[in-house]
Amino acid sequence: MPENDEPQPETIAGKQLRQVEELFIHSGGLQTTIVRFGGLIGGSRQPAKFLAARKGLADGNAPVNLIHREDCIDILIQIVKQDAFGYVFNAVNPHHPKKAAYYIDKAKELGLEPPTFAENDSEEMFKQVDSVNLKSVLDYTFKVSIL
């Protein structure tokens, strides 16, 4: 889902976030840019730690939508430096490995017992978030790989 696709939040929290975005987007006289960050990794923040040794996790075929904290900071700096206001940015690393493969590999790298994932229905649809505007507006290149 790139930035120009209209979000269709399903959860209460998602709907509330969308309402807040709309308030900022339509507020007069306020320079606004919306940044939708993916799941944060970096430093002590490694989601594989929370999933280690868990069994039968769902959605193993779903793509991960993650971003390293160094890229989060750099993207915000670039928005200010380039005066890139009036945009929506999906701040998500362009690599989207499948959830099961990613978290199993990361758990092993950390010396943790890998999680296991339940069998998935091959017909399931998952949301992949793409960062089109980061490249086209900011000419941004990600600094830190999530792989």
Image (cartoon, rainbow, N blue to C red):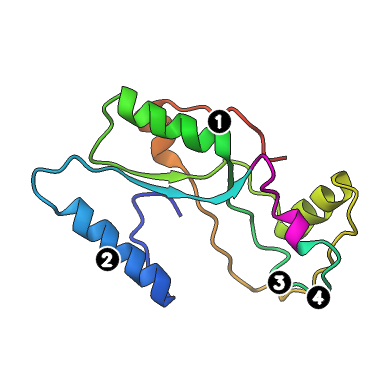
Mark 4 or 2 closer to N-term?
2
Q: Name the spot of residue 97 as percent of width and height, x first.
A: 69, 50
Question: Label 4: which residue?
Answer: 56
The answer to whether the residues at label 1 and label 4 have Cβ atoms under 8 Å apart is: no
Residue in view at x 46 percent, y 55 percent: 1
**Residue 9 visible in the snapshot:** no
Label 2 Cα neighbours within 10 Å, binned few <14 / some 14-19 / many ≥20: few
**Type of amino acid at the residue the image marks with label 1:** Phe
Mark 1, mark 2: which one is toward the viewer? 2
Label 1 Cα neighbours within 10 Å, binned few <14 / some 14-19 / many ≥20: many
Q: Residue furthest top?
A: 81
Q: Is residue 92 left or right of residue 45?
A: left
Q: Is residue 147 left or right of residue 2?
A: right
Question: Label 1: which residue?
Answer: 142
Q: Who is closer to the viewer here, 130 or 71?
A: 71
Q: Name the spot of residue 144 as percent of width and height, x first.
A: 63, 31
- Distance Cα–Cα, label 4 vs label 3: 16 Å
Mark 4 or 3 closer to N-term?
4
Q: Residue furthest left?
A: 28
Query: Which span of residues is magenta-colored?
Result: 42-50
Question: Label 2: which residue?
Answer: 19
Residue in view at x 33 percent, y 69 percent: 16
Mark 3 or 2 closer to N-term?
2
Rendering quarter of residue 44: top right
**Type of amino acid at the residue the image marks with label 4:** Gly
